[in-house]
Image (spheres, rainbow, N blue to C red):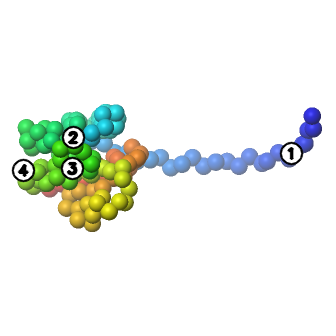
Amino acid sequence: TIVLPLPAAPEVPVAAPPPVQVRGGTETILVAEDDPALRRMVAAMLERLGYTVIQAEDGLDALECFQANPSRIDLALLDLVMPHFSGRDTFKHMRSLCPGIRALFVTGYGDSLPHQQVVEEAPEGTLLLHKPYRLEVLSAHVRTLLDQRD
């Protein structure tokens, strides 16, 4: 066995990262995501922030939930790729019922052409969030959209 003495490195204090601002609220958010595990996780994240969450398993389910009481839902979080209706089509139907509804579109497809088109043609009152995302990014996007309401 060979032992090589190494000089001790001086201790360098590591600065703590700045605290992350995570803001919640009490509004109601409709979460439409066809992946059950991801839908439950997002709902739990939003509920921890104080929001009331209504879960929908696809675009058709989301539209039915919205039609049941459009004035109760403050924001729709819509996966862009879902069975029955895409997130974009679901939002168009919602907006025809309630012109002031806001939407956070979510995608796991990065900057592919159809999803880039959503960004370029995004109606007022919408944002796009790429999966995977962190809680602080989700909360910031949600608050931005909710705070823009009339």
Mark 1 vs mark 3, foreground winner is: 3
Give the mark, 3 or 2, whose residue is nearer the N terminus.
2
Give the amino acid at mark 3. Ser
Locate residue 6, reporting x and y percent.
86, 45
Give the amino acid at mark 4. Leu
Residue at numbered disc 2: 58
Q: Which secondary structure lies at badge 3?
A: loop
Instruction: Classify 10 Å Cα crowding around label 1: few (below 14), some (14-19), many (20 and above).
Output: few
Q: What's the CA distance linking mark 2 and mark 1?
A: 60 Å
Identify which residue is drawn at 8% across, 41% down: 67
Q: What's the CA distance linking mark 4 and mark 2?
A: 18 Å
Residue 97's tag is 4
Give the mark, 4 or 3, whose residue is nearer the N terminus.
3
Give the amino acid at mark 2. Asp
Identify which residue is drawn at 7% across, 54% down: 96
Residue 6's tag is 1
Mark 1 vs mark 4, foreground winner is: 4
Residue at numbered disc 3: 86
Which residue extends farthest bottom? 120
Q: Which secondary structure lies at badge 2?
A: loop
Q: Is residue 18 left or right of residue 6?
A: left
Q: Which secondary structure lies at badge 4?
A: helix
- Quick check: marks 4 and 3 in contact, CB under 8 Å? no
Task: Please tell me which residue lies in front, 35 or 3.
Answer: 35
Give the mark, 1 or 3, whose residue is nearer the N terminus.
1
Q: Pick the quarter of the image with the C terminus.
A: bottom left
Locate residue 82, reporting x and y percent.
24, 45
Q: What's the CA distance linking mark 1 and mark 4?
A: 71 Å
